[in-house]
Image (cartoon, rainbow, N blue to C red):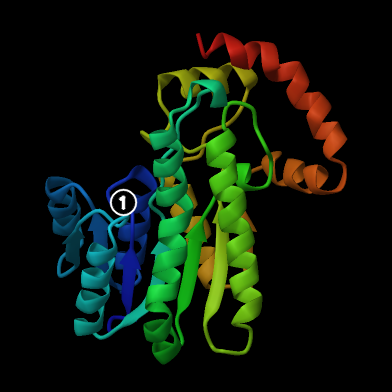
Amino acid sequence: MSSSLCLLTGATGGIGQAIAKALYAKGWKLLLVGRNAQALEKLSATCPDSEIFIGDLTDDTTRIHLAVKAKQLGGVKLLINNAGVNAMQSLEHTSSEQIDNMLSTNLSVPIKLCQLFLGQLQYTKGTIVNVGSSFGSIGYPYQTLYCASKFGLRGFTEALSRELNGSGVKVAYLAPRATDTTINNSKIRALNKELGNKMDSPKLVARELLALLDSNQTRRFIGFPEKLFVRINGAFPRIVDNAIAKQLPKIKRFLS
């Protein structure tokens, strides 16, 4: 696998770093993408011979420059759309700029990257992995924008997977539950503890991604009971409505 290139967005986040190190150990050549030059260089030092790309992927020109660099490195074999942002707050107190930023970062950018790199992936018979969330299947209060973006990413991934069936390009969706990274601030961590929600390590998420790559699956959901709730919410959403309604007073306490 040493000649195969993986492009990883959100490389310096907790999950991104774990994925980078796991793929490097498997012999992948890495193109690590992020906004923080110092953090990218530090991560690159732990994965010798990896390449870094610094830039804001919401910018059209930046994405084109990224595609050019990837082509110069031989073309992408594995595209992992991992970059994402989150904020736990009411829709009422969310600004227009926050709406645009979350939907762009979590949904529009992965879609545009898939489109941009499709030619390279068709040439290499490669794979796309879009990193979503259990909240991409379960609507959760005070996570409206995050849910909207991840629901959209899940639907996009499913549709593209079916569109590219037989093309040689695999399109897959990985859905972690709450993970021990900085995307979860102190309030979210305290709420998870209060509700008894488990938080997985980034290394576990990385192992699950490797398992997804090694399988014929196009979807992989992480954690129990979250995987069960996803199925129940799909078939009997009223049950989940009632369960979350009981949690709502506790959730509201952590927003004040």
Residue 134 appears in view: yes
Please state the horizontal and vertical placement of residue 54, each as a whole percent of the image: 18, 57
Taking depth in this image into account, of 96 and 123 the one nearest to the observer is 96
Q: Tell me which residue sits at (59%, 41%) in the image.
A: 147
Q: Quadrant of residue 5?
A: bottom left
Taking depth in this image into account, of 222 and 153 the one nearest to the observer is 153
Please state the horizontal and vertical placement of residue 1, each as a whole percent of the image: 34, 81
Going by the numbered disc 1, the residue's amino acid type is Gln
- Relative to 168, does residue 70 appear above or below in the rendering? above
Task: Tell me how many marks there are.
Answer: 1
- Relative to 51, does residue 45 appear above or below in the rendering? above
Q: Tell me which residue sits at (20%, 62%) in the image.
A: 47
Label 1 packing within 10 angstroms: few (<14), some (14-19), many (20+): many
Provide the secondary structure element on which disc 1 rests. helix
Residue at numbered disc 1? 17
- Relative to 177, does residue 193 appear above or below in the rendering? above
Q: Is residue 160 left or right of residue 234?
A: left
Please state the horizontal and vertical placement of residue 134, each as a whole percent of the image: 62, 44
Q: Is residue 46 left or right of residue 165?
A: left
Q: Is residue 84 left or right of residue 253?
A: left
Taking depth in this image into account, of 181 and 57 the one nearest to the observer is 57
Please state the horizontal and vertical placement of residue 247, each as a whole percent of the image: 70, 18
Q: Tell me which residue sits at (86%, 33%) in the image.
A: 239
Q: Is residue 233 left or right of residue 202?
A: right
Q: Tell me which residue sits at (63%, 20%) in the image.
A: 195
Residue 176 appears in view: no
Q: Quadrant of residue 252?
A: top right
